[in-house]
Amino acid sequence: MKTGKWCYLLPVIGVVFGLWYVRSAFVDVVYSDYIRLVNSYLPDVWDPSKFFVGDILTRIPLNYAARIVNVTFFGYSIRFDQTLGIIFLGVSALQITAYGVRQNIGAVWIISLMAVIFSLNKWEMMINGSGWIHFLAFAGFYCHYLVLERVWQGGEKKNDRLWLLTLPWIVTIGMAGPYCAVYTVTLVLAYGLAMGLKKAGGGQWEKRYLLYAASAMVPLLLYMWSSSLAEPEKLGVAEVSLMTQFLDTPGFFLRFFIKSFSSMVMGVECAQAVFATNTPYFVLGIAVMGGYGLALWQQWRYGLYKETVFPLMLLCSGGLNHILIMVSRWVFLREDYGMSSRYALQFQVGILGMLLTFGLAGRKMAAEKRGTWAKGLSRCFMAAVTVLLLAGNGYTTAQEVKKAPIRKEYCAARARLALDFENRTDEELKANFEYHMSRPEGGAEVREALEILKKQQWNIFRQPN
């Protein structure tokens, strides 16, 4: 199937599907992270003291602007945030589609990419609107990577070099938040590769890439400095260092790591409902890791990275995200924690890079006149991994669509409880609003947030026009 302009309809269809899903699975009522946001920033969203704090660079300034718009025009609606998230997921999909069309990888591969991007394995991120900025962040990452792609291919536009200097400041400080580390490392590695290839080709060291790398590193260092000024928050239950825990239970880290890859085939809730032992998780995880290995081999075998660096950057970013999640989330001492829906947005980056590499490599293989056993084996494994990913994501999406009415009814019950919060206990509020359930003050904080919203007639207390 040829790549055509009709492929640009696919991101639009995906956005419509995403908006339909969140409307089918959610009732507009605050919960979870929104409790903290209400207590921290409402009712006076214009108060500068809530913005100009020690760790200001970690607060993602665009969140403040969106919150002002939401309160002013939509009465603090979660739907507003959800819609932003789905739209920016569509922006990412549009960029991936545009790249695929330019590279003429074939419509089958673009359809596969869209199936992964709009898979409901990330249902938690889609429903919890407070994470809308993260969808924008990844759209920003792809934008930067594609600007570098143009410079890499020699087809740069007038201001591309200026964008390479300024985008890290916009993306890291303005929207990336905790995702900026992997984004920065990926850029630095790409710039290093660009310098190395230029030198290996008999040219001179292009020092401008050092300037680009420095421009990427400085915002990250500023973010880390600002983050150090924030009050530390206990993240989990582990009371020992990572090294101590690793030496004590090395198998835990291996299982955590492999299972995180398996989540890209099947969402954790679906997997837990189907699998009774660890073996299927390991089979799926190792298969996805094998897909990474095949894609990297194809990058080297066909020299794809010399022609287009975008898929390799996505592969690198995806792999780094798996490592980052394991290093930062092991403290919960749950080996399936890395399978959480909230990490699917980070992990899918590598899958996109894998599928793009498969598409480009498939075109190279088709152009080869002679076949070899290695080529045949590569084709078979490439097809098997792709089918596995699509089947697993399709199954997860189908199951989440079935669960949508159940999730909506649960939200409706939460909305009814919110309207009657004065007559409910703190324990009821803490449990039903999924907020700091391990902390005794969680219920009181939920009550405080609902009191603010009721007084202002916002969110679930907003009167219909």
Image (spheres, grey):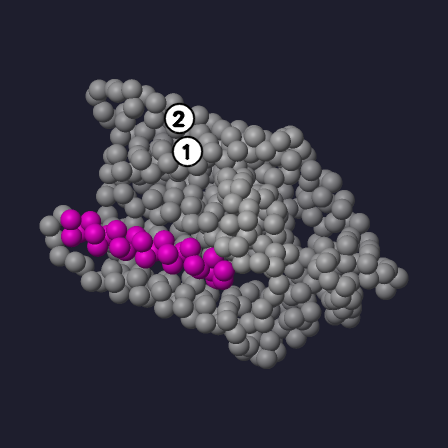
Q: Judge whether 40 appears above or below 283 on screen.
A: below
- Magenta segment range? 175-200
Residue wearing tag 1:
290
Q: Residue 130: x percent and y percent?
A: 60, 58
Residue 273 - label: none
Q: Which label sits in the foreground, 1 or 2?
A: 1
Q: Is residue 196 magenta?
A: yes
Secondary structure beneath dot 1 equals helix
Q: Residue furthest front?
A: 248
Q: Residue 325: x percent and y percent?
A: 51, 51
Q: Main secondary structure of the magenta part?
A: helix
Secondary structure beneath dot 2 equals helix
Q: Tell me: 13 left or right of 402.
A: left
Q: Residue 60: x percent and y percent?
A: 51, 66
Q: 240 or 184: nearer the eye?
A: 240
Q: Residue at x 23, y 24 (%)?
A: 368
Q: Judge whether 256 appears above or below 362 on screen.
A: below
Q: Is residue 50 magenta?
A: no
Q: Judge whether 268 appears above or below 181 on screen.
A: above
First in sequence: mark 1 or mark 2?
A: 1
Q: Residue at x 34, y 22 (%)?
A: 377
Within 10 angstroms of label 2, few (less than 14), some, or many (20 or more) residues? Answer: some
Q: Residue at x 66, y 46 (%)?
A: 23
Q: Residue at x 41, y 34 (%)?
A: 291
Contact between labelled residues 2 and 1, with CB atoms less than 8 Å apart = yes
For the N terminus, give its image quadrant. top left
Residue 381 - label: 2
Q: Residue 227: x percent and y percent?
A: 50, 69
For the C terminus, give its image quadrant. bottom right
Real-space CA distance between mark 1 and mark 2, rounded to the nearest whole angstrom: 9 Å
